[in-house]
Image: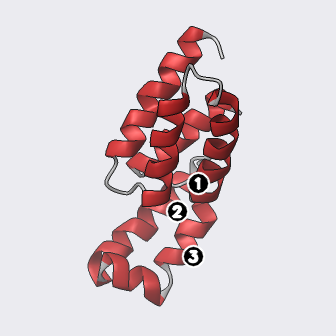
Amino acid sequence: MEKQVLDEVIKKTNELIAAPSCSQEAKDAANAWLQAVGTDKEAEETKRYIAELEEDIMPIDGLIGFAKSEAGVKVFGKEKVKEVLAHAEEIKAAGAKYCDCPACAAVEAILSKIK
């Protein structure tokens, strides 16, 4: 990976780790990847990292479905879930493929650089 791309991915990886919406599994994979950068384990950890990120990123249709579900109401609450749904439908109409929460936005940026 060229240095400029690597620097961008490291920056976005740190943003992912700091995101409140980041899963523990993604944080663990991100930290393992950061520790492997520059070592003989970098390529192997990059593959694991990409696999975890692909599992964790929320497609916009998945977010819409979740916001319409009882589980979505439980997570967000009756009022907030309406805002989440409206926002998700708005960004989908604008062409978004994924949720735009801080974690998903970081994952999308990372995948666009290393995949």
Q: Mark 3 — residue?
A: 65
Q: Position of residue 64 (x, y in %)?
A: 54, 70
Left/right placement of residue 106 relative to residue 53 reads left
Q: CA distance from mark 2 to mark 3?
A: 10 Å
**Mark pair 2, 1: CA separation:** 6 Å
Residue 23 seen from this side? no
Relative to residue 107, is residue 65 depicted above or below?
A: below
How busy is the neighbourhood of tag 2: few (under 14 within 10 Å), some, or many (20 plus)? some
* Mark nearer the viewer, 1 or 3: 3
Residue 66 picture location, percent across and down: 52, 76
Residue, disc 2 = 89
Checking the image for residue 44, the label placed there is: none
Could you tell me which residue is drawn at 47 percent across and 75 percent down? Answer: 67
Task: Indicate the secondary structure of the residue bearing disc 2.
Answer: helix
| Mark with earlier residue (1, 3) | 3
Q: Secondary structure at mark 3?
A: helix
The nearer-to-camera label among 2 and 3 is: 3
Q: Secondary structure at mark 1?
A: helix
Q: Mark 2 and 1 residues: CB-CB less than 8 Å, in contact?
A: yes
Asked if 49 appears above or below 40 in the picture, the reply is below
The image quarter containing residue 57 is bottom right
How many circles with numbers are drawn on the protein?
3
User: Please, what is the three-letter code of the amino acid marked with disc 3?
Assistant: Gly
Viewer can see residue 82: yes
Whole-percent x, y for residue 5 in the image: 58, 17
Amino acid type, label 1:
Ala
**Residue located at (37% from left, 57% from top):** 21
The colour scheme of the drawn protein is secondary structure
* Residues packed near mark 3 inside 10 Å, few (<14), some (14 to 19) or many (20 plus): some
| Distance between the alpha carbons at the discs numbered 1 and 3 | 15 Å
Asked if the residue under mark 3 is in contact with the one under mark 1, i.e. CB atoms within 8 Å, the reply is no
